[in-house]
Image (spheres, rainbow, N blue to C red):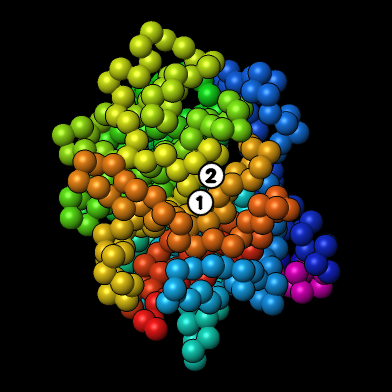
Amino acid sequence: MPTLSQRIGLCSASALAILIAATLPAATQAPPGFSPLDKSNPAASKQDGSLRPHATPPLPAALDKLPVDKLKLPPGFKAEVWSHGHAGGRTIVMGPKGTAFIGSRIIGRVYAVTEKAGKREAKVLLQGLTQPNGLAVKDGALYVLAINKVLRYDNIEDRLDNIGTPVDLTDKFNLPPDIHHNWKYAAFGPDAKLYIQVGANCNICEVNPGVHGQIRRYNPDGSGMEIVARGVRNTVGFDWHPVTKELWFTDNGRDWAGDAGPEDELNRIPKDKEGANFGFPYCHANGIPDLDIKRPDPCAGVVMPAALTGPHTAGLGIKFYTGGMFPAQYQNVAFIARRGSWNRGQKTGYDVIIARPQPDGTAKLEPFMTGLLDTGKNEFYGRPTYLLPLADGSMLVSDEQNGAIYRISYAAR
């Protein structure tokens, strides 16, 4: 029987899309719908009831179709294609030997990008997983998180052609199996512990605060679990401030409460408030009580956001910049990839913004990379999802919609 790659070589582009879809787990073939737990009422939101999440193409865009020419940056910055051909690629992590690993959500793949003779090549490293968005690297091992599965591939960069059987840590991490809002983000913190998000298993509902709506941390072997934040609806991006070491995270607000929001959030966990509550499901944004899930004094004790990042803009990846290439005013500034709205009539987001931390713990937001949204036509051309600073001081930005990664560099004029 022909292999998948042999079959791909024999079929047309349209047939290929069908073939790829057929190889994915049933749960990943379409964006997840509402959980049975949901208490939202789309009709009451006065929004267009036909709004649906934008489909992620099963095929990457051709090199000559990538929208790099549309990208707009501050003076001195330049965008170029760093790699392409990895459909649905989202998260990016780098191995110590220079291999870039890319996670995905809907398409269920993990890619590896290597460089040979000055040319980068992307290959499918793993496939058939359920939303393997969470990747982390430690001591040469690649951790892959696919909903509740945690797999560790030791010495991964020496075994790219035959990765072998992973160390299965699933039982030790004991993550819930719910798919809704549980596509993972994971990263090792300054304390060498693995931080993992566990999202809400609904759009809006009451959750078990001991199971969902959290950020957790573990020892690398899955022991010693602690909850460092509660009341978090859906964060799939966090990073640590280079100076204070405080954890900052993006959080996507609820849908079907109106085009105006409540707005998505950028949050920070003060050192003296680990385990604090960030509001979900009772309190949103800068103190807005929920319309559907009510309780007395809903915002009491809630840590307010460092900044609001816009209604339905879907901030995902966040990285603080510490490199030596960008101008000094970008040092210790957070870059945030906003994937862009779906639950909003007039689209917004589809860009990269920066957040400048302020002495009072808040942040000021500024645009950085724009051009992928035509507001007049209400059309988008790409969806930035994650970022990765490189050793030379440049920064990578993944574009899930086009299956590409752009490199942002700076040269003084």
Q: Give the image location of residue 405, x and y in percent.
A: 53, 68
Say which quarter of the image contains residue 360: top left
Residue 338: give its label.
1
Q: Nearer the viewer, residue 310 or 89?
A: 310
Q: Give the image location of residue 76, x and y in percent.
A: 42, 77
Under circle 2, the secondary element is: loop
Sooner in the amino-acid sequence: mark 2 or mark 1: 2
Q: Nearer the viewer, residue 61 or 282?
A: 282
Can see residue 376?
A: yes
Q: Give the image location of residue 401, x and y in percent.
A: 63, 58
Residue span colored magenta? 5-11
- Image position of 3 with respect to 52: above or below: below
Q: Quadrant of the C terminus?
A: bottom left
Q: Nearer the viewer, residue 146 or 319?
A: 319
Most common SS among magenta residues: helix
- Image position of 313 with respect to 56: above or below: above
Q: Is 7 covered by the magenta stretch?
A: yes
**What residue did someone put label 2 on?**
313
Under circle 1, the secondary element is: strand
Say which quarter of the image contains residue 334: bottom left
Q: Is residue 180 left or right of residue 31?
A: left
Amino acid type, residue under disc 1 in the picture: Arg
- Using the numbered discs, state the Cα–Cα distance from disc 2 to disc 1 in whole angstroms: 6 Å
Q: Residue at x 27, y 35 (%)?
A: 228
Q: Are marks 2 and 1 in contact (CB under 8 Å)?
A: yes
Q: Is 391 covered by the magenta stretch?
A: no
Residue 106: give its label.
none
- Image position of 312 with respect to 296: above or below: below
